[in-house]
Amino acid sequence: MSAESEDVPLYAERPEWSDVVPVPQYQGVDALAPINYSAEYQDATDYFRGIIRMGETSPRVLKLTRDIINMNPAHYSAWQYRYKTLIAIGADLTEELRQMDDFALTNMKTYQVWHHRRLLLTALRSRDAAAGELAFTARVLAADAKNYHTWSYRQWLLAHFNDEERLWAGERAWVEDLLEKDVRNNSAWHHRFFVVWSSGVREGDEDREAVGRRELAFAKEKIALAPNNPSAWNYLRGVLEHTKTPLSALTTFVQLYTVSSPSIAPEVMDLDNPVPTEGAQLPCVNALEFQADIYEQEGGTQITKAVEIWKSLANEYDTMRKKYWEYRIKEGLQTTHT
């Protein structure tokens, strides 16, 4: 998909394109702010519109769409017509994927790049190609571990082909490695949740309970490493919600992070509730919020305790969200008076 390095003439100057009548873009009569396209882009898109009018699908159309996409990677119509042409002429779709690898790496934040790959994989219907794409997305995410389009595409691959042995098998270990490198990578946490609870593995009720326990333990370990990482706390809440486990089940763990300096003697160390790493900034805002939510769920006189925590968050520990905590305080006080 890379542009040719040498200077090339405009399409209007090429004899092999003389049979195409270019169609200029209409910008209105006396446009107040006409778009200042480059001569090369205007020339190519004029001929592209001429090709669409003719309905031509041919190798030269692939070259034309390549040139347009190199100048404007987000040109949706050029991508769509390129795909239509590839199918019409029976092109090698696997080769198309490989040709645009470097282009995708350079333009990874462009949605159309990933949509095109999705269309190609759908047409190929190949689990071998899907496995190759998992390897490719890993390369892209090594360059930008939080690129939304790449993560979305990877999840589509897993769900669409749903090959437990070849695609899903190593996914949890792979994303776990990403979290080892950056425990604050929210995209990786989101993907782990997707992998654990949306995989093709059909787990019985007992197995799902074991999975829930494993995921809670995993999240706790990561929270202990970085207590003020909201991604891990959100994951913890997600596991509880998915397994229909009350927040209060984690009271012992959460309370370790709501005090300024937990004192836990080694001889009474609870492996199910890892303590914060030395030097951690405490109390943890996420833990305080969690504890307040426990009190709110319990209701009754416990609401008063929740209100006190919200006041501490509003006035001391999380003043950036002061208005939000004041709203929670107001709601809590109304509850206690009804």
Image (cartoon, grey):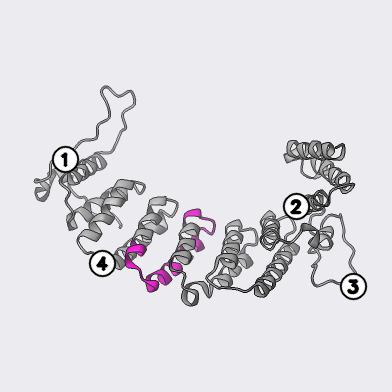
Name which residue lies at 9% across and 48% down.
Answer: 15
Local secondary structure at mark 3: helix
Name which residue lies at 37% across and 70% down.
Answer: 129
Sequence-wise, the earlier of marks 1 and 3 is: 1
**Amino acid tagged 3:** Val
Sequence-wise, the earlier of marks 2 and 1 is: 1
Q: Is 15 part of what is drawn in magenta?
A: no
Of badges 1 and 4, nearer the viewer stands 4
Residue 139 located left or right of residue 304: left
Give the CA separation, mark 4 to mark 3.
Answer: 64 Å
Local secondary structure at mark 1: loop
Location of mark 3 (residue): 268
Give the CA separation, mark 2 to mark 3.
Answer: 25 Å
Give the CA separation, mark 1 to mark 4.
Answer: 29 Å
Residue nearest the observer in this picture, 192 or 239: 239
- The answer to which image quadrant residue 128 occupies is bottom left
Location of mark 1 (residue): 22
Residue nearest the observer in this picture, 5 or 111: 111
Image coordinates of residue 330 in percent, x first then y, are: 80, 36
Q: Is residue 328 above or below residue 197?
A: above
Give the CA separation, mark 2 to mark 1.
Answer: 61 Å
Residue positioned most to the bottom: 165
Q: Tell me the tag on residue 92.
A: 4
**Amino acid tagged 4:** Asp
Sequence-wise, the earlier of marks 1 and 4 is: 1
